């Protein structure tokens, strides 16, 4: 059984009405839709006064799950939640934690679609780590995305047919992730604004990324362990 998958990344607030109309139309004929972060307009340190409209638009397009990017983060917890205000789909961040070890967001998502068991994990670029002086001012710390992914892959792989990594760590690190965790079927990446017109195969892992600022929409078909499809100009 095959699955049709939509992917976006690094929208930077560019999911306008025209793009949304095209996205909603494409979503009607697909099974899954993922976003790989930096979807909001404001930058890292800005604090929104109102919920970013992208969250309502992703909901209208029936987003399956997403991972946070650096734009969706903040050192202050109240500002962090202000950036996520309005989100209604699962927003993942497995390598994000508070200093007491609690996790503000889920790390994984599982769903059966058309008889296919799909498992998803999300990791993002570390903004503040244990070794940084900035940790004193931050409500959150970021763990190593590779070590986090390794543990999640070991947990998810036995019970899913399709294992997806939603990442916002950049293309070079996606390549490393595919090498370190070859059990991953598909990495849907972001952060580096890399344009991969067709999926890149590393070992048995397919890697996709669609540039930035709403230039391209990724549409793929997953069947019998093979991913086909690629990027399409959005508007």
Image (spheres, helix red, strand yellow):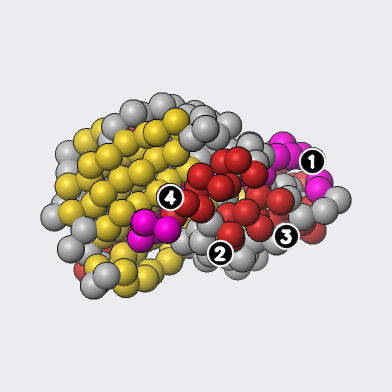
Disc on the earlier residue, 1 or 3: 1
Q: Give the spatial CA distance, label 4 vs label 1.
A: 32 Å
Spot occupied by residue 140 in the image (x, y as percentages of width and height): 66, 54
Image disc number at residue 144: none
> Disc 4 marks which residue?
26
Residue 178, given in percent of the width and then of the height, sits at 28, 41
Q: Is residue 156 left or right of residue 227?
A: right
Secondary structure of the residue carrying tag 4 is helix
Give the vertical position of 46 relative to 68 (above or below).
Answer: above
Q: Which mark is residue 85?
A: 3
Disc 1: which residue: 46
Q: CA distance from mark 2 to mark 3?
A: 11 Å
Asked if the residues shown at circle 1 and circle 3 are in contact, with their CB atoms under 8 angstroms apart, the answer is: no
Quickly name the residue at label 2. 89
Residue 190, relative to residue 73: is it above or below?
A: above
**Mark 2: secondary structure:** loop
Range of magenta residues: 28-48
Depth check: 20 or 174 in front?
Answer: 20
The alpha-carbon separation of the residues under discs 2 and 1 comes to: 23 Å
Q: Residue at x 37, y 56 (%)?
A: 29
SS class, disc 1: loop
Q: Which circle, 3 or 4, is nearer the viewer?
A: 4
- Residue 64 location in percent, x, y? 46, 61
Mark 3 closeness class: few <14, some 14–19, many ≥20 residues within 10 Å: some
- Secondary structure, magenta segment, majority class: loop
For the residue carrying disc 4, how many other residues have a C-alpha within 10 Å: few (<14), some (14-19), or many (20+)? some
């Amino acid at each position: 059984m095959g699955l049709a998958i939509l992917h976006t990344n690094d929208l930077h607030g560019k999911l306008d009405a025209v793009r949304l109309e095209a996205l909603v139309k494409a979503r009607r004929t697909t099974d899954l839709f993922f976003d790989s972060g930096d979807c909001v307009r404001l930058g890292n340190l800005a604090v929104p006064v109102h919920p970013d409209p992208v969250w309502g638009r992703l909901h209208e397009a029936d987003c399956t799950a997403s991972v946070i990017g650096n734009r969706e983060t903040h050192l202050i917890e109240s500002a962090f939640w202000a950036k996520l205000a309005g989100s209604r789909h699962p927003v993942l961040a497995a390598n994000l934690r508070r200093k007491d070890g609690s996790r503000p967001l889920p790390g994984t998502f599982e769903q059966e679609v058309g008889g296919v068991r799909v498992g998803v994990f999300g990791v993002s670029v570390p903004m503040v780590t244990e070794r940084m002086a900035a940790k004193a001012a931050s409500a959150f710390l970021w763990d190593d995305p590779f070590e986090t992914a390794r543990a999640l892959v070991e947990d998810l792989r036995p019970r899913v047919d399709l294992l997806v990594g939603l990442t916002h760590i950049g293309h070079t690190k996606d390549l490393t992730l595919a090498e370190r965790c070859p059990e991953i079927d598909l990495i849907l990446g972001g952060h580096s604004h890399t344009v991969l017109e067709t999926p890149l195969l590393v070992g048995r892992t397919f890697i996709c990324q669609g540039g930035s600022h709403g230039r391209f929409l990724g549409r793929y078909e997953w069947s019998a362990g093979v991913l086909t499809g690629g990027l399409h100009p959005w508007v």
